[in-house]
Structure formats: structure tokens, C-alpha cells
């Protein structure tokens, strides 16, 4: 009986599969729609696994099968789709093809470039093959290359600040496919932000924060102008010395421990007007990456962080102009083709005009800044591109014709990007960068000029050995010229004589190699090594001291004093005074539990050979850079970090949590009462100690929808320790750990953006931080009728809690207008509840009452701002 049933079932299957049907498929036909075509013509039913998404489109070109048997149709489909069909009875089963089936296929290379809506290559865009669950990222030329089995696939393209894009492709041989992605700000109709800001779960890189210009322009700041540098203060682990202060501090590090790069060239000062504005013009900046830990081997020279800022590439097809007019400053940008499709330029200028209003008000003071950014690109062919980037900026101050100052940066970098093949490309660049400072005091009839300049060459290669193994390697060299200052009289009755402080020269070189290895689908490993060398060079005369101690301890007065030179040694031009060499290993590991959750860990060692001479928390324009040498060793960092990363609800929300520990050797410390201004023997006022910082960083983001933003919180501690060199010496703070000037126990930022409709959007930023560590007097004694304060141990006290709330509204009169004159207004209020945050506390004696009193200095109260922005 059972044989009869089996025979009948077999005959029924033959009859069913022998039916001839007509089916048409194309790029717009989903699997569900394909099922209906067959089920409407036959008695077949479809069955499939949970892995199959029937709403996906698996067909890449229009094909019509006319009057074919079902069995032959299934056989043909199995050759061209990434799913497997099989007939069992009157059921057609559908499942993902096994890896064995895929590997049995011939593999081909999928390659191409990713461009944005202005036809500019996109660096670091993600290309993901959904069906194979593999992917890659674009290189510095926007190129990608990945080897996959022949077949039909769905490719997803994503990048921060741009709309996600999906496309069906068919691969039967090596193929080049370029993709264009659109900025999410161009979306019409309902305003829904779709930029992919979710955590990259599998990438080994951790302790890095990225901000696009769309995000930066939404964050309210003082004076109403978008500021890339101020925006990073909303990220976990990043603080500064307070309002209107220059520099920034990362994970308890000093400002001079940050490497700031603009298109790959170093920049030595980061602010205008003593910290009111940063040097980065938001109109021309493309975006920024802040590396706080797990720093790749290609970066070196600083021990706290790397801020990698890139400028836009000019439009290759059309001429465009945009700019803005604000209360304090205005800006203008022009871009367009030099030769359509091949060459482009972009130039941006910015200037302040507060000095004009001062003169109209009959105020003799003057304060202004200006800067100019430019970038030129030329594509000779698909494999060769040259580019030039430049920056020039200055600040000019004049106070009652008694005090004048001028300072600023100049930077230029020329690069050649070359692709040897789809797997190997290189970037050769040469740069120049300098920082100048001039100070003139007319009442004393003298001027002081100082400068640091550097010349560098870099050659970097990127080699993709396979889809799972990449190698980055390179070499670089940099020559430094330090001029601490020239003091010169401006009249014959000046009390100052001409004096040239000793110039210093140095050469720094390094080589690095970095490996990125996907060990399994879940485990990724990046490891590398950097070796750096530093040479302090002549010509220079170096003082010698008894027992080689430039600082001596006076046990009678219990203070450190400047040592007395016993002689000197002269080193001729190019002669080596001191040399250092350091291995700097790096490693990072990520393990993905699934597509939405991972843990990561990293370690990196870094060496820093140049230092800023400053005993203030916020760098000042007159701060002097100096190289390591006989009395100043290079700083050495060891940093460990581990973190937990998760995306929620289809990447609508993301969470990053990290723990870190940093240890820095050879950190410079200053003796009490140190005089570092125009000091030709700076070794006489510095001691060498160490520093450490450790803490927890949390970042929670809402990535999509009308309301987006993030909450960041950091709980951390930053300390220094400078023990005595002998048992009799106390060191600093009795040789114990004490708070560094960059310690902020609590640091909370809340950033939100709400798109009400295409015309109106609203933004807010709340910041709360622990007060900055300071040293207060704990008593006083009277000497000759004068109250002389007695100070506590270093940094035992704190300024009051720091907090403020900023809001902004953006109004776009004609949001649907995409051609011709387009404009929008930004209205902002900084510190809306008028918090008087303390910049410093001073302790004085009231002249009328003779009582001791404390005075608080505040920089900002409430600051309204408005700017008009346009483009055409």
C-alpha cells in the first residue's frame, strides 16, 4: 500500500513540475511578488526559513521566462540568485545558499568609488553586502574593493550625515560600480533625519568620536557662530579650562598633549581672540575625528589625543557661493571647477569687525581676527590625484596704544594620492606649518617676537591583502625650528637691550606598520608598531650644572631654587645634542556578540618630544614650545581602555560605555614661583614627575527621527606626582599625588535637536562640570603692615560648579528652494539663565575696611546671538 502511495505522490510531482508557466522578474520585483506569479499559475506553495526576507529584491535585471517548466525555471534561478530553491512534492523550499555553495562559485572583484551629492569622494564610507554579511570601507580616494562569489546581491552604503542607500547588483565577472549618496539635509517633505550615526559594532577602533558638520552647526555656542572645536566639548572625556579659554583637555591630559591635524598637517594653536573662537571655519570643514585612545600607529608625537580635521573638496561641476553674517564676524566661501570633472578649488575667508564698532564708539582699543582657508584638487586620471590645502590666520590686539599683540598660524600641505592597483594605494605629502607671536609694550618701548616652524614629509601606503586582512604602513620626518623669542628696543630710551634667546633645532622621524585582521565573523584584531626617533640639534650652547642639577633644593628655606651654571658646552650646527628612540606598540580587539552588541579593548603607547612651557591651565598666545633635550625627557604614555557598545531598535539608538587608565612618564612640573617668560635656561625652574588619569565615559545617542541628540557623562580623576630626588627633598605637594589642573570629576553634556517642520528647528545644549582645581590661601601673616597669604598644597581646592544652558532656533524661509539664492537665520542664546561661572577667584584686602575678601571673575553672562546664512 505504501508503495502505491509513494508512486502516486511521485507521479503527481512530475505532473506538477511539468507544468509550463510564464514568469517575469526585474529589479523592482520582491520575492513575495515572485511567489505570487508562480502560485497563480500552479499548485505550488512556497516555504522559507526565517533568514529569508520576502520583501527583499533579489533580481537585478529584467528577465522573462516564457512557457518553461517549473523545474527548469528553478534551475535557472539558482544560477543567478543568492538564495537556493528546491522542489519537494508540491512545495518549493527557499533558503540562503550555504557557504559551500557560495565558495564553489567563481569569485569576482567588486570595486568602485563612493561620491557625495557634490561629486566628491567619500572617505570612510561603509559598503556592506547584506546577503554575505561582509563589508569594507572606502579609502582616502573614496575607493573600495571587495571579492565576492558571482551572484545577485543587495549592497548597502552608509556614512555619517548621509542617507543610507541600498542597491541590487549582479556580479558575474570583475565589475566597477560607483555609488552616489545624498546628504540627509537635502531630504524634502517630512523632516526625518536618517544619517547613520550608529556604533560600528565590529570595527576595532574605539575611543573615537566623530562629528559631521550637520551636527556641529546644530550646537549652540557663544557669539552664535558654529564652532567645530567648541562642539567637541560636548563629547565624553573632553573639557577645557572654562569659558573663553583656548585649548581642550582629553581624559585629563594637557592641551599641548593633543595633536591637531588639518588635512594631515600639524597646527600649533587652535583659537582666535584668546579662546572666543576656534581657528576652524565651519563652512569649509568637512568633519572631524577625535581619537582619545586606541590610537592607530599612523599617528604619533602627542600623548593625549589626535584631532583629525579635514576640509571639503571643491565642487568639480558647478560654481557655488555661501556665507554668513553675524554680530561679531562674517564669512564667505566660493568653490567650483578649475576644469570640469578634473580640477576644483574651494576658498573660504572669515573676519571679525568688533574693532570697527569700538572706533565708532570712540574706543581706542582694538581687537580683531581674520583667516583664510583654501584647497585645490586635480584628478589626472582614476589613479592619480594631487591636492593642496592651506590655512593662514592672525589675531591683532591694540589696547589704548600701550599694548599690542599679533599672533597666528600658517599652514600648507601638498599631497599626491596614487593607486597602484585596487588593493594598493599611497599618499605622499609635504607640509609646512608655523606659529608666530608678537608682543609690543609702548610704555616700555620694546617688542618680543617668537616662533615655531616645522617642515615635514610623509609617505603612507594602504594595502588590502584580502577582504579580511589589511596592512597600513609608512614613514615620516619633521624638522623643527624653535625661536623662543627676540627682545628688541623700539626707541633709544628703552630699558631693554636687544636679546636673542637661544634658538633650538630638532628632527623627528618615525616608521609605522598597522595590521587589521578579521579573525572570525565575530572577532577582529588590529595591531601595529611605531618606532620614533628624536634628535636635538645644534647650533646651541648648553649650560652645565654641578651634579647635573639645574634645580637645587634649599633646606633652610625649604624651597626649590634655580641652579647656578658651572660652565657650558657648545654644539655646532647640525651636531646632535641629545637623541631619543622609542617603540610604540598599539593593539585593539573587538568581539561582536551579534550584529548589535560588542565589547572592545585597546592598548597604546605613545611618545611626545616637544612641550609647551606654560604653568597655566589654558594655553596663552605667548606660550613657547620647546624640544626634549639634556634636561627634558620625552613624555611616554601607556593607555588601556575597554568598552561595551550596543545599537538598539534598528540603530535608532546607540550606547557606548568605556573605562580607561592612562599613565604618563616624564611629565614636566614647575617649582613654586617659576618664571618661564623669556627664560633662556628653562631647565632651572622645572622638575620631572609623572601623571595618571582614569575614569568612565558614557555616551547615549538618539540617531533618527525629528528629535535627535546625545547625553554624555564622564566620571574621571587626573593626578600628578613629583617626588623629591633625594630623601631630603619634598618634591611638589610633599611628593604625593595631587590633582592636576585638568581634573574634572564630573562632566555632563546634553545635546538635543528638534525638527519642528521644514522651516523651524530648535537646538539645545546643557553643560555641567566640576570646578577646576585651584590653590587657595589657607591663612596669612603680617609683615611690615602687609598681609602676606600662605597657600595650601597645590590644587587642594576647586572653583565653584560650572554649568550653563544654551539654546538656538534655525529659521529657513523657503526650505523647498534648492536652486538660486537660499538662506536661513540662526537665533541663539548662550547661558540663557545668566549663570556667572567663575573663571578665577582672587583674595584681596579691602582698602576701605581692611577686611579680607574674595572676588569672583566671570567671563560670560547671558549672550544673545543672531546670524544670517546664505548660499547660491
Image (cartoon, helix red, strand yellow):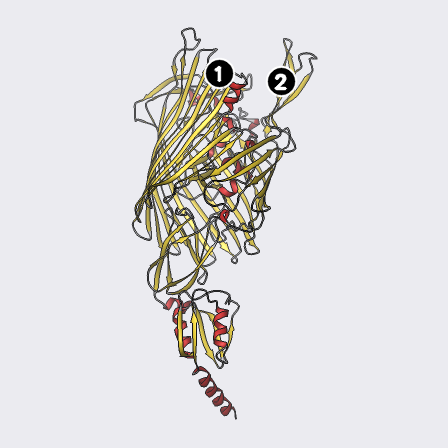
Outermost residue on the bottom side: it is 1
Q: Nearer the viewer, residue 685 or 203?
A: 203
Q: Pinpoint residue 696: horizontal percent, then vertical percent.
A: 57, 43
Question: Is residue 384 visible in this depiction of the protein?
Answer: yes
Report the Cα–Cα distance between label 2 and label 1: 30 Å
Q: Is residue 700 above or below residue 483?
A: below
Looking at marks 2 and 1 on the same chain, the residue that comes earlier in the sequence is marked by: 1
The reply to whether residue 797 is in sight is: no
Q: Quadrant of the C terminus?
A: top left
Q: Compare residues 615 and 36 and report the one nearer the observer.
A: 36
Residue 733: quadrant of the picture: top right
Q: Residue 155's spot in the image, x, y percent?
A: 43, 59
Q: Secondary structure at mark 2?
A: strand
Foreground disc of the pair 2, 1: 1
Q: Is residue 319 left or right of residue 786?
A: left
Instruction: Name which residue lies at 48% across and 36% down.
Output: 664
> What's the residue at 51%, 15% (across, down)?
400
Residue 789, numbered label: 2
**Residue 328 x/y as whole percent:** 52, 28
Residue 637 position in % (x across, y down): 46, 38
Q: Which residue is mark 1?
A: 403
Is 726 situated left or right of 835 in this image?
A: left
Q: Secondary structure at mark 1?
A: strand
Residue 3's place in the image compared with 259, above or below, is below
Please give the name of the residue rendered at 57% of the width and 30% of the height, measured from the top-left corner: 243
Amino acid at each position: 500500500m505504501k508503495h502505491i502511495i509513494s508512486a502516486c505522490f511521485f507521479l503527481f510531482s512530475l505532473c506538477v513540475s511539468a507544468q509550463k508557466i510564464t514568469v517575469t522578474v526585474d529589479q523592482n520585483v520582491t520575492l513575495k511578488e515572485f511567489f505570487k506569479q508562480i502560485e497563480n499559475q500552479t499548485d505550488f506553495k512556497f516555504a522559507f526559513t526565517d533568514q529569508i526576507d520576502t520583501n527583499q529584491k533579489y533580481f537585478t535585471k529584467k528577465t522573462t521566462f516564457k512557457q518553461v517548466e517549473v523545474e527548469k525555471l528553478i534551475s535557472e534561478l539558482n544560477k543567478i540568485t543568492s538564495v537556493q530553491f528546491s522542489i519537494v512534492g508540491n512545495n518549493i523550499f527557499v533558503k540562503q545558499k550555504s557557504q559551500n555553495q557560495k565558495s564553489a562559485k567563481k569569485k569576482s572583484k567588486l570595486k568602485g568609488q563612493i561620491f557625495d551629492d557634490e561629486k566628491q569622494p567619500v572617505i570612510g564610507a561603509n559598503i556592506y553586502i547584506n546577503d554575505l554579511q561582509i563589508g569594507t570601507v572606502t579609502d582616502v580616494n573614496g575607493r573600495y574593493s571587495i571579492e565576492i562569489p558571482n551572484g545577485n546581491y543587495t549592497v548597502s552604503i552608509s556614512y555619517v550625515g548621509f542617507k543610507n542607500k541600498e542597491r541590487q547588483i549582479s556580479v558575474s565577472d570583475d565589475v566597477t560600480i560607483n555609488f552616489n549618496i545624498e546628504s540627509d539635509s537635502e531630504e524634502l517633505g517630512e523632516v526625518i533625519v536618517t544619517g547613520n550615526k550608529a556604533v560600528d559594532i565590529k570595527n576595532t577602533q574605539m575611543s573615537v568620536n566623530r562629528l559631521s558638520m550637520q551636527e556641529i552647526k546644530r550646537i549652540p555656542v557663544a557669539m552664535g557662530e558654529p564652532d567645530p572645536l567648541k562642539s567637541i566639548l560636548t563629547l565624553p572625556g573632553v573639557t577645557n579650562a572654562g569659558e573663553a579659554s583656548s585649548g581642550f583637555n582629553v581624559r585629563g591630559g594637557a592641551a599641548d598633549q593633543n595633536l591637531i591635524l588639518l588635512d594631515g598637517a600639524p597646527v600649533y594653536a587652535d583659537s582666535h581672540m584668546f579662546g572666543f573662537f576656534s581657528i576652524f571655519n565651519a563652512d569649509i570643514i568637512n568633519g572631524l575625528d577625535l581619537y582619545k585612545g586606541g590610537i592607530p600607529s599612523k599617528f604619533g608625537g602627542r600623548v593625549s589625543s589626535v584631532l583629525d580635521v579635514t576640509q571639503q573638496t571643491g565642487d568639480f561641476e558647478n560654481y557655488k557661493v555661501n556665507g554668513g553674517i553675524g554680530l561679531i564676524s562674517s564669512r564667505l566661501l566660493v568653490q567650483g571647477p578649475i576644469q570640469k570633472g578634473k580640477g576644483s578649488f574651494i576658498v573660504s575667508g572669515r573676519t571679525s569687525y568688533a574693532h570697527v564698532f569700538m572706533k565708532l564708539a570712540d574706543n581706542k582699543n582694538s581687537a580683531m581676527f581674520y583667516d583664510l582657508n583654501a584647497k585645490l584638487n586635480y584628478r589626472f586620471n582614476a589613479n592619480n590625484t594631487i591636492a593642496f590645502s592651506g590655512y593662514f590666520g592672525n589675531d591683532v590686539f591694540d589696547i589704548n596704544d600701550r599694548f599690542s599683540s599679533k599672533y597666528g598660524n600658517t599652514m600648507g600641505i601638498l599631497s599626491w594620492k596614487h593607486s597602484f592597483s585596487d588593493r594598493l594605494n599611497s599618499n605622499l605629502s609635504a607640509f609646512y606649518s608655523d606659529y608666530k607671536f608678537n608682543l609690543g609694550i609702548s610704555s616700555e618701548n620694546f617688542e618680543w617676537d617668537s616662533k615655531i616652524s616645522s617642515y615635514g614629509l610623509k609617505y603612507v601606503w594602504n594595502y588590502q591583502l584580502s577582504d579580511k586582512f589589511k596592512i597600513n604602513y609608512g614613514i615620516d620626518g619633521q624638522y623643527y625650528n624653535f625661536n623662543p623669542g627676540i627682545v628688541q628696543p623700539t626707541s633709544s630710551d628703552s630699558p631693554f637691550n636687544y636679546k636673542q634667546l637661544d634658538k633650538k633645532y630638532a628632527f623627528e622621524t618615525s616608521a609605522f606598520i598597522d595590521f587589521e585582521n578579521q579573525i572570525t565573523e565575530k572577532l577582529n584584531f588590529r595591531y601595529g608598531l611605531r618606532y620614533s626617533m628624536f634628535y636635538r640639534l645644534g647650533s646651541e650652547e648648553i649650560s652645565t650644572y654641578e651634579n647635573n642639577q639645574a634645580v637645587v633644593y634649599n633646606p633652610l628655606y625649604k624651597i626649590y631654587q634655580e641652579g647656578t651654571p658651572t660652565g657650558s658646552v657648545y654644539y655646532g650646527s647640525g651636531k646632535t645634542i641629545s637623541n631619543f628612540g622609542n617603540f610604540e606598540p598599539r593593539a585593539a580587539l573587538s568581539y561582536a556578540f551579534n550584529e548589535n552588541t560588542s565589547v572592545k579593548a585597546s592598548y597604546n603607547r605613545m611618545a611626545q618630544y616637544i612641550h609647551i612651557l606654560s604653568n597655566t591651565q589654558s594655553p596663552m598666545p605667548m606660550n613657547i614650545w620647546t624640544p626634549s633635550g639634556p634636561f627634558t625627557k620625552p613624555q611616554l604614555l601607556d593607555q588601556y581602555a575597554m568598552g561595551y557598545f550596543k545599537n538598539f531598535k534598528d540603530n535608532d539608538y546607540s550606547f557606548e560605555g568605556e573605562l580607561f587608565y592612562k599613565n604618563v612618564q616624564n611629565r614636566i612640573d614647575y617649582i613654586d614661583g617659576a618664571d618661564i617668560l623669556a627664560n633662556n635656561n628653562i631647565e632651572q625652574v622645572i622638575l620631572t614627575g609623572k601623571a595618571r588619569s582614569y575614569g568612565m565615559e558614557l555616551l547615549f545617542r538618539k540617531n533618527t527621527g525629528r528629535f535627535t541628540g546625545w547625553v554624555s557623562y564622564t566620571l574621571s580623576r587626573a593626578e600628578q606626582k613629583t617626588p623629591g630626588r633625594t630623601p631630603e627633598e619634598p618634591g611638589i605637594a610633599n611628593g604625593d599625588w595631587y590633582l592636576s589642573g585638568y581634573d574634572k570629576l564630573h562632566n555632563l553634556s546634553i545635546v538635543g535637536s528638534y525638527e519642528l517642520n521644514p522651516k523651524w528647528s530648535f537646538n539645545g545644549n546643557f553643560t555641567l562640570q566640576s570646578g577646576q582645581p585651584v590653590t587657595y590661601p589657607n591663612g596669612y601673616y603680617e609683615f611690615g603692615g602687609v598681609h602676606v597669604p600662605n597657600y595650601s598644597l597645590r590644587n587642594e581646592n576647586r572653583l565653584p560648579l560650572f554649568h550653563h544652558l544654551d539654546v538656538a532656533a534655525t529659521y529657513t524661509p523657503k526650505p523647498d528652494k534648492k536652486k538660486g539664492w537660499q538662506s536661513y537665520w540662526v537665533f541663539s542664546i548662550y547661558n540663557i539663565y545668566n549663570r556667572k561661572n567663575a573663571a578665577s577667584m582672587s583674595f584681596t584686602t579691602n582698602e576701605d575696611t581692611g577686611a579680607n575678601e574674595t572676588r569672583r571673575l566671570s567671563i560670560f553672562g547671558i549672550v544673545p546671538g543672531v546670524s544670517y546664512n546664505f548660499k547660491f
